[in-house]
Image (tube, rainbow, N blue to C red):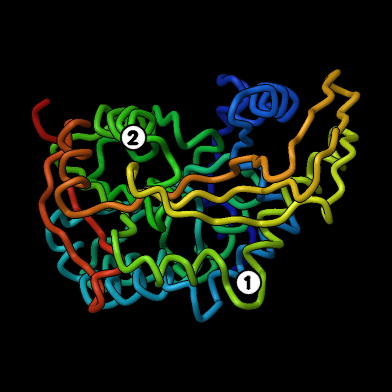
Amino acid sequence: MREDTARSRIVLRNTLREQASPYDLRGDAHAGLSSTPKTLPSKYFYDARGSHLFEMITRLPEYYLTRAETEILERESGRIVEAFRPRVLVEFGSGAARKTRILLDAMLERGLLEGYGPVDVSAEASRNAADALTRDYPHIRVEGVIGDFERPRDLPFAGRPRLMAFLGSTIGNLEPTHATSFLTSIREEMTAADGFLVGFDLVKDIDVLERAYNDEAGVTAKFNLNVLRVLNRELGASFDLDAFRHRAVWNAADSRFEMHLESVVEQVVRIPSIGLDISFAAGETIRTELSHKYTRESAGELLQASGLGLESWCTDRSDRFALALARAGSV
């Protein structure tokens, strides 16, 4: 397949100019580090170094999520596709890796596959996914949206039966009210012919979660501390990474694991570019990530509150992770 022919099947529409940018490091850092308790958004983990560290995390023996989700997709992809017989896969967060291809292959085997629609804030990630998939699937058309996937609108391939997929456990990184708002926005974009597939990390033995967030090799700790490197580089902050340590704790009341960076000494950190001097007591933390864990009941309640009806619920053999298939229902 000639490269120019493959490229002719790719259309990427940039909506970032029409949206308020989802990335405002100066504003987010000022607001989060001035608040009580102190917080930073997890999206700032993912510079080039952070993305590489996260890829390392997904291969760790303690990190079960990717393996569990892949197991479900390999077993259930045929049934997922048969439930809606979609012609297009629309994916929130672009991907050309194994999980995406399992669904595309199931559609291809049934003579259904026409298109792929990545929705991602990264133009580079969208282009890389589009190039890889048009090269490997000679007849696929890619219509992508470069924009904030948490504010979905005018999704690609309107009028064609679509399977919309939000793979991984990113839904768990959203506060429940934010998750409801996000899923409601997706439901408003769906027609009766569309299906929605979403991943949920499940409530499980705390020891399993502890190991996943406190891996023996310390990769998750490096990933967490990387956000301070980002602030130092981008905002001229004075964070001493040796003066903070990674902490991951289970919040039973809210059914979530929380990642924190704990100040090991009393200190003041300066960020002159945003006019901020931040005092830390020894033991005080910055909360950097939330990861809500769901049951079938709580996931169903979230979907119902968003106007989505649960069609099927599939878990891995160890009941660590679930994929929920839903359709637009009445509110």
State the residue position of label 1.
56
- Residue depicted at x 87% and y 36%: 237
Amino acid at the residue labelled 2 = Pro
> Can you tell which mark lies on residue 176?
2
Quadrant in which the C terminus appears: top left
Q: Which of disc 2 and disc 1 is earlier in sequence? A: 1
Residue furthest to the bottom in view is 61
- Callout 2: SS: helix
Image quadrant in which you'd find residue 296: bottom left
Q: Position of residue 233 (x, y in %)?
A: 87, 42
Choose between 156 and 217: the one closer to the eye.
217
Q: In this rendering, would 312 be left or right of 219?
A: left
- Residue depicted at x 20% and y 43%: 194
Amino acid at the residue labelled 1 = Met
Q: In this rendering, would 95 be left or right of 105?
A: right
Image quadrant in which you'd find residue 53: bottom right
Quadrant in which the N terminus appears: bottom right
- Is 250 situated above or below 321? above
- Residue depicted at x 62% and y 23%: 35
Choose between 198 and 261: the one closer to the eye.
261
Q: CA distance from mark 1 to mark 2?
A: 28 Å
- Is 190 situated above or below 319? above
- Callout 1: SS: helix
Q: Count all numbered tags in the image, as a single digit.
A: 2
Q: In this rendering, would 135 be left or right of 107?
A: right
